[in-house]
């Protein structure tokens, strides 16, 4: 990175309570800065190294895949005395400079660890990495050139205010939220070597016309399209089946059967590739929905709202719902080229009810549920992301009551939207 850009660079460490932003003290006015204090999440660490796998010459796909490999390499070589955290860096007012990176924490300055980080920098084509040392209440950053015996440049760092919008959402190419079929298609075409991609693209090519027109698809919908969304253990599957029977409507799911067998394969991929898979699933399903609704209503168990809410909550990475992009941000807007449902509902239950239902399932938890269970802050980000989605926004149904109470509430929403008559 050029020296003048490096001076403006802002780093962020993702901690449980939210990102900690810091930058060069010489670039910050005193009123906008504060001395760096050791976060409560890692009180025993005195030094941390930051490293990225991003290269400016590479595409987003290649950078994301390299980042995933770097995470694996670091994780496989760290001892128990070290910790590994996610983070990122960016240059304010330059949205396309967002880069994901990792922070390796150590209780002491450690030459073997420094050497390992240098090796990783060289392996992933980086010209530099950063060493951050907490000393006498100050955070001293050293920019280290990755070459052998590289030059070291030290400067004090200060914490800075949280930006008004998470930097991952200042540019569409910074995140894994998709607002068009073509972007998802383009991402997948860049990684033909990934297992399942060739088959997925083949199915999409067969089922989604190359020049489909969303307006004509919408006109085909002579009957209502109803979407139900919700976290695991909200009663969503039971309710969709019951609605389907009442309306004499098929219950469809995303991802659709034609690609559902690939789900486990793509769930193991980096978030960008994973969400591209789910996005194509939504468009494939939309083609089927357009045909079905010519003769009868359709009920859908999860659609674009889920794909997007999970992606936003994941991309933010840490903290509570306050870390999300502000309401009205374009990231929450329905894609202009995707079939729009007539009604979308979100089932919400209190934590006690959801926990009791999970215990009563008597079966193993899904991967998504394990992830949800680990962090109440992630669940809070996820639910709030659902609530901020627009056009159509989600109609909230309190699903904490009995099955009959929840069903009655859902029927009332259908009446409110003139899908059912009194």
Image (spheres, grey):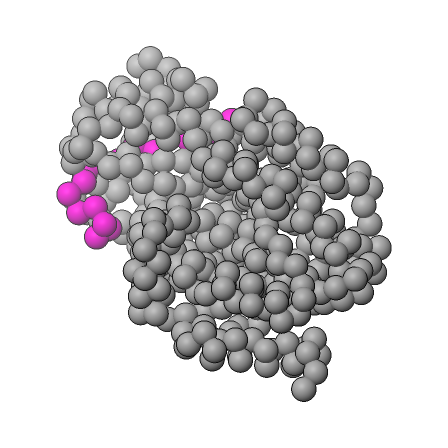
Q: Position of residue 182 (x, y in %)?
A: 71, 40
| Residue 285 visible in image | yes
Q: Nearer the viewer, residue 156 or 47?
A: 47
Quarter containing the C terminus: bottom right
Q: Residue furthest top?
A: 148
**Residue at 17% from the left image edge and 47% from the top image edge:** 43
Image: magenta residue range = 39-58
Quarter-wise, where is residue 297 in the image?
A: bottom right
**Secondary structure that dominates the magenta span:** loop
Q: Position of residue 113 (x, y in %)?
A: 23, 24
Q: Position of residue 174 (x, y in %)?
A: 55, 42
Q: Nearer the viewer, residue 416 or 192?
A: 416
**Residue at 63% from the left image edge and 29% from the top image edge:** 199
Question: Is 51 included in the stretch rendered in magenta?
Answer: yes
Quarter-wise, where is residue 415 in the image?
A: bottom right
Q: Nearer the viewer, residue 68 or 407?
A: 407
Q: Position of residue 88 (x, y in %)?
A: 42, 41
**Residue at 53% from the left image edge and 79% from the top image edge:** 409
| Residue 388 visible in image | no
Q: Is residue 383 left or right of residue 152?
A: right
């Amino acid at each position: 990175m050029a020296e003048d850009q490096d001076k403006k660079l802002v780093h962020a460490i993702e901690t449980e309570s939210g990102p900690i932003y810091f930058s060069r003290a010489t670039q910050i006015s005193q009123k906008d800065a504060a001395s760096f204090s050791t976060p409560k999440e890692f009180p025993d660490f005195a030094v941390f190294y930051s490293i990225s796998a991003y290269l400016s010459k590479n595409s987003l796909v290649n950078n994301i895949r390299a980042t995933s490999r770097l995470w694996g390499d670091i994780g496989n070589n760290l001892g128990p005395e070290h910790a590994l955290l996610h983070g990122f860096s960016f240059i304010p007012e330059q949205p396309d400079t967002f880069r994901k990176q990792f922070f390796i924490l150590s209780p002491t300055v450690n030459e073997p660890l420094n050497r390992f980080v240098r090796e990783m920098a060289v392996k992933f084509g980086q010209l530099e990495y950063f060493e951050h040392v907490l000393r006498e209440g100050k955070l001293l950053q050293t920019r280290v050139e990755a070459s052998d015996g590289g030059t070291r440049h030290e400067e004090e760092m200060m914490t800075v205010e949280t930006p008004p919008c998470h930097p991952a959402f200042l540019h569409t190419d910074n995140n894994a939220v998709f607002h068009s079929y073509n972007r998802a298609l383009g991402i997948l075409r860049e990684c033909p070597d990934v297992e399942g991609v060739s088959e997925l693209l083949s199915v999409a090519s067969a089922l989604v016309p190359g020049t489909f027109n969303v307006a004509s698809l919408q006109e085909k919908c002579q009957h209502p399209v109803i979407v139900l969304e919700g976290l695991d253990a909200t009663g969503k599957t039971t309710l969709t089946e019951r609605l389907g029977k009442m309306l004499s409507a098929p219950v469809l799911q995303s991802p659709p059967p034609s690609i559902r067998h690939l789900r486990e394969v793509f769930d193991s991929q980096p978030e960008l590739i994973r969400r591209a898979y789910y996005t194509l699933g939504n468009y494939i399903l939309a083609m089927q929905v357009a045909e079905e609704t010519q003769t009868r209503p359709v009920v859908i168990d999860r659609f674009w709202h889920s794909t997007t809410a999970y992606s936003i909550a994941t991309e933010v990475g840490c903290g509570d719902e306050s870390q999300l992009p502000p309401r009205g941000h374009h990231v929450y807007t329905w894609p202009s080229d995707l079939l729009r449902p007539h009604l979308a509902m979100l089932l919400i239950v209190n934590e006690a009810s959801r926990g009791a239902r999970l215990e009563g399932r008597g079966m193993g938890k899904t991967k998504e549920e394990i992830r949800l269970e680990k962090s109440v802050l992630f669940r809070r980000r996820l639910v709030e992301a659902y609530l901020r989605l627009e056009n159509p926004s989600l109609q909230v149904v309190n699903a904490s009551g009995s099955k009959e109470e929840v069903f009655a509430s859902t029927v009332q929403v259908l009446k409110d939207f003139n899908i059912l008559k009194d």
